[in-house]
Amino acid sequence: MKNKSLSKNYPLWVALPTGLIYTIFTVAPLFMSGYLSLTDWNIDRLSTPVFKGLVNYQAILADHIFTTSLINTLIYAISTSFLKVFFGFILAILLVRATKKNNFLRTLYYMPCVLSTTLIGVLFHSILASNGMLNNMLSGVGLSFLTTDWLGSYGSAMGSIIAIQTWMWAGFNMFIMISGLQAIPDSYYEFAEMEGASNWVKMKNITIPYLVPAFTVNFTLNITGGLKVFDMVYVLTEGGPGFDTQVLSTYVYRDFGIGLLGESCAASIVLFLIVALLTYITNRYFTNREVEM
């Protein structure tokens, strides 16, 4: 009887350690941040924060740097999500067949996403510097008029970070797309060919509709990761020039670093709410468009 009861509750016992760790390191800090965001907690009041209500939220919403960070975060998350999914889809279409050449190319395109973000950031920092490899190459082929400080100029800094992030994660999106393509039965395409359907018609009516689950996974992961980006931005530009590449995560880090701990918590809670909302909207949008095989 005892063994039967233990067997019945086995999944619960297995999940308990994971749930405990998740509660300690995720749920508890989230609630603590929520409370501290409503206090005047700062570097001078580390142990005696006083409840102040929504003062910190009012302060960050009135801060033009926070507004700039929010806009930059949305631009970054949306741009990188669409670009990574687009290039991942193109690569998947080209490399879906399992040949030796395609397997090698899959590995090649996937490799950047398993490398350290810091390593890639340092590498591209040297490539895109004003006296870096890219400008030297452009000057060497007579295109010196195209040279610029890619990470130190307004406009080009954010574009450079978006391009690097797209290059780094397109291969990851490619593999999810390939999994989705391989799950589509060949009989669908064979029947379409018997009906005289063109490649475009097969793409529009078979490939894309039945690939929506892969789009759901990719867009959800990319939007979530894009909104929470920190390491790549910090390594490449530290939020500069000025605040041109400042995102919400670097804003939280900046406020924490200068001792505005309550405001930092408030900004992190706003970031959490934005991530939760946009992730839910993205997932719901694509899930409602999935078709059954």
Image (spheres, rainbow, N blue to C red):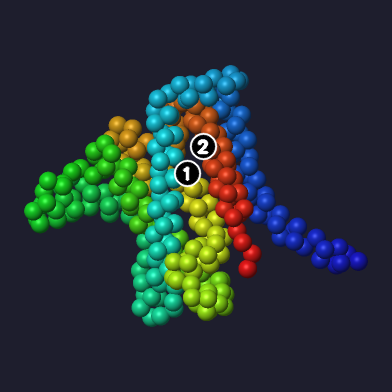
Q: Is residue 257 visible?
A: no
Q: Which residue is mark 2?
A: 271
Give the number of the disc on residue 76. Answer: none
Find residue 277 and report its image quarter: top right
Spatial CA span between label 1 and label 2: 8 Å
Q: Which residue reaches farthest right?
A: 1
Number of numbered markers: 2
Q: Which residue is mark 1?
A: 228
Earlier sequence position, callout 1 versus callout 2: 1
Q: Is residue 120 left or right of residue 229?
A: left
Find residue 217 and report its image quarter: bottom right
Please identify the quadrant where the N terminus is shown.
Answer: bottom right
Residue 98 image point, x, y percent: 44, 78
- In the image, is residue 205 above or below residue 240? below
- In the image, is residue 63 above or below residue 31? above
Residue 252 image point, x, y percent: 45, 34
Which amino acid, by three-letter code, is at mark 2? Leu
